[in-house]
Image (tube, rainbow, N blue to C red):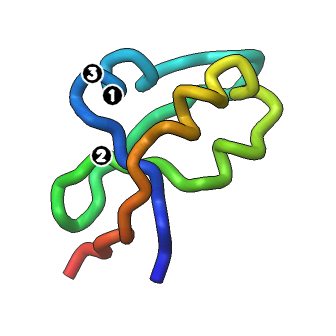
């Protein structure tokens, strides 16, 4: 089981496309058409400024494409 971060609509608008240095936060769709991003972003120093917001995102199980 792979756990990922899932934003609600407001969080998606607020965080998607965030840029710092050469890093950009982009959510992708999983097999259930939900926007997700990997937990690795919580450890990325380029996203420290938005860590609290990222840490509040819902944690869900990743759904692969069939």
- At horizontal 39% and vertical 48% (from top left) the residue drawn is 58
Estimate how packed mark 1 is, as few (under 14), some (14 to 19) or many (20 or more) residues with alpha carbons within 10 Å.
some
- At horizontal 44% and vertical 41% (from top left) the residue drawn is 57
Q: Vertical placement of 1 versus 20: above or below?
A: below
Q: Percent x, y for residue 2? A: 49, 75
Q: CA distance from mark 1 to mark 2?
A: 8 Å
Callout 3 secondary element: helix
- At horizontal 30% and vertical 46% (from top left) the residue drawn is 35
- Residue 41 located left or right of residue 64: right
The residue wearing badge 3 is 10
Q: Percent x, y for residue 47? A: 70, 28
Q: Earlier in the sequence, mark 3 or mark 2?
A: 3
- Residue 26 located left or right of residue 66: right
Q: What is the quadrant of residue 8 in the picture? A: top left
Viewer-proximal residue, 47 or 55?
55
Q: Which mark is residue 35?
A: 2
Estimate how packed mark 3 is, as few (under 14), some (14 to 19) or many (20 or more) residues with alpha carbons within 10 Å.
few
- Residue 66 located left or right of residue 47: left
The residue wearing badge 1 is 12
Callout 2 secondary element: strand
Q: What is the quadrant of residue 62 in the picture? A: bottom left
Q: CA distance from mark 3 to mark 2?
A: 12 Å
Callout 1 secondary element: helix
Q: Percent x, y for residue 55? A: 57, 39
Estimate how packed mark 2 is, as few (under 14), some (14 to 19) or many (20 or more) residues with alpha carbons within 10 Å.
some
Q: Are marks 1 and 2 in contact (CB under 8 Å)?
A: yes
């Amino acid at each position: 089981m792979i756990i990922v971060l899932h934003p609600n609509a407001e969080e998606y608008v607020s965080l998607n496309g965030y840029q710092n240095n050469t890093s950009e936060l982009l959510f992708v769709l999983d097999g259930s058409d939900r926007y997700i991003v990997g937990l690795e972003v919580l450890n990325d120093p380029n996203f420290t400024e938005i860590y609290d917001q990222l840490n509040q995102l819902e944690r869900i199980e990743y759904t692969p494409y069939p």
